[in-house]
Image (cartoon, rainbow, N blue to C red):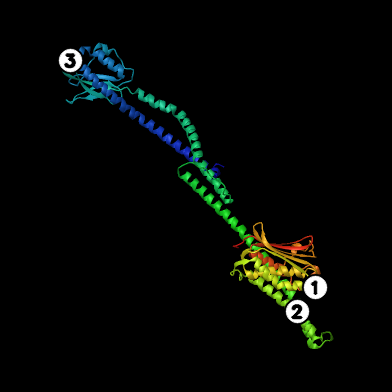
Amino acid sequence: MLRRKLIESLTARIFFITVLILLGAGTVTFALIAWATPSTYTAVVNEDLQQQVDALAKRLKNTDFEDSGPVLEEFIRTTRADAALLSPDGKSELSLPAQYGEYTPEVSASEVTVYNDGGGSVSITSLQQASIFADVTFANREETYGLYVSPYAREENLAVQALISMAPWLLLALLVFSLLCAFVYSRYITRPILRLNRIAAGFAQLNFDWTSNETRRDEIGALSRSLDQMAARLSSALRELETANRALQGEVERERERERQRTAFFSAASHELKTPITILKGQLTGMLEGVDVYRDRDKYLLRSLQVAGRMEHLIQEMLIISRMEAGGMDSSREEVDLSVLAKRQLSLDRELITLRGQHLICQLSPGITVTGIPALLEKVMGNLLSNASLYSPEGAVIRVWCGMEHGHPALIVENTGVHISDLALPRLFEPFYRQEESRNRRTGGSGLGLFLVKMILDRHQASCSIENTKEGVRAKVLFLHTKHI
C-alpha cells in the first residue's frame, strides 16, 4: 500500500524524501558534533589555560618565592588544573610552600616523566592530558623555574556524556520536526501542481472556464498564467469553432433544403410539361391520321398553338428562375422608378383588362425609386396584374397603388369579386401551386408566377404578402431599401 501510494502520489513522494533528507541531515550533524566536541573542547580549554598560565607567570615574576603559595593555590582553584613546579636544574620536583601543599586536586593522577635540556629526567604526578610548560621567575630569586600544568578534563567527558544521554530525545525531536517540515513543505510544493492537474483534467473534458488565479512569481506561477492564457485562447477558439460549426450546419441544412426544393421544382416542372406535350402530341397525331374529331385542322391547330404558347411561357419562367439561381441576372442593377414601371406595365395590360369587362383604378405617386433589375421588377408587376385580372370575374375592380408606406417604397395590387381560401393562402408562393378550382388551366396559369415573384423580391430585399379583404384580394410589395440592396 505504501509503495503504491509513493508511486501514485507526488505529495507522498516529496513528503517521504523530505523526511529522509531531514533525518539524515540531523543525524549526520549530531554525529559530527559528538565527534568534534572532545577535540574542540580540549583545544578551547588548552588555549584558555595557556592564557591563564602566561598571566600566572607574569604575576609570579613580581611575587617572592615564599609568597607564591596563595597565588598558585588561587590559580589551581580557578583553573581546576594539576600543576608541578620544577627546580632550575629540571631534575627534581620542588616542594611548594606549605599553603599550597595542603591543596589536593580532586582528580586521579598518573606519573609522567619530564626530560630537561641536560639529558636528565624527573617523574612527576600529572593528569593524563597534554601539559603546558612555562618558565617562571620569582622576585627574590634569579633562577628560572619550570611550571608544568595539566588541564582538568572531566568537563569534556561530561559534555560528551550529556550529548550521548540526550541522543534519543534529540532523535525524537528531529523526527517530529522532520515530519512537520516535510508535511508543510510537500503541501506547499504540490498544492499548485495539484491545482494545475485539476485544470488540465478540465481541459481534457473541453472545459476551458478554469482559472488558477495563481499569484506566485516563480516557475509554477508562470506555468499557471500560461495555462490561464491557453485556456482563454482555447475557449475563444472553441466558441468560434462552435459558431462556425453552427453556421456550417445551417448552411448545409439550407443547401439541403435548396436541393430538395430544386428537385421538387424540376419534378413538378417535368409533370407540368408532360401534360401539354401529351395533349399537343395527341392533337397533331389525330390531325395527321385524319381522325374524325380532328378533321377541323384549323380549330385544333389553334388549340395546339395555345398549348405551345403555354409551354413557351412556362419554359421562359423556368429559364428566368434558373438564371436567377445561378446569379446570372444580378449584375445589371440600376435605379428604377416604380411609378414609371407601373405605368408602362399598365399600358400593356389595360386593353386586356378592358376586354374582360374589368375596371382599372390607378393611384401612382411620382419619384418612388428603388435600386434593382428593371426586367425582373417588370416581371413582378406583370405577374401581379395578370393574376389580379385572370382570377377576377367580369365587372371586378382592379386597383393599383404606388407610394411610400412607413418610409419605404410600396406597391399594392387589389382585385375585387374573389377570395382565396385560408388553406391556400400560405401556399400561394410554392412552385406550381394553384387553387383546385383553377387547376384545369383554363386561365392559362403556369403555377410559377407567384413563386417567381417571391424569388425576385427576395433578391431585392423586398417582401410580398397576399391577404383577403372585404371586397377581394390584396397583394402588397414592400421594399426595405430605396437605393441599395
Q: Secondary structure at mark 3?
A: loop
- Given residues 112 and 69, the one toward you in this image is 69
Quadrant of the frame with the C terminus: bottom right
Q: Are marks 3 and 1 in contact (CB under 8 Å)?
A: no
Q: CA distance from mark 1 to mark 2?
A: 14 Å
Amino acid carrying label 3: it is Ala
Q: Earlier in the sequence, mark 1 or mark 2?
A: 2
Amino acid carrying label 1: it is Asn
Q: CA distance from mark 2 to mark 3?
A: 165 Å
The nearer-to-camera label among 2 and 3 is 2
Q: Position of residue 226 (x, y in %)?
A: 49, 48
Left or right: 416 as drawn, with respect to 41: right
- Given residues 281 and 297, the one toward you in this image is 297
The residue that appears at 81% across and 85% down in the rendered structure is: 294
Q: Earlier in the sequence, mark 2 or mark 3?
A: 3
Q: Which residue is mark 2?
A: 306
Q: Relative to 279, say whether 464 is above or below.
A: above
Left or right: 194 as drawn, with respect to 481: left
Q: Earlier in the sequence, mark 3 or mark 1?
A: 3
Residue extending farthest to the right is 292
Q: Position of residue 477 (x, y in %)?
A: 69, 63
* Image mark count: 3
Q: Secondary structure at mark 1?
A: loop
Q: Which residue is mark 3?
A: 139
- Given residues 267 and 366, the one toward you in this image is 366
The residue that appears at 84% across and 86% down in the rendered structure is: 292
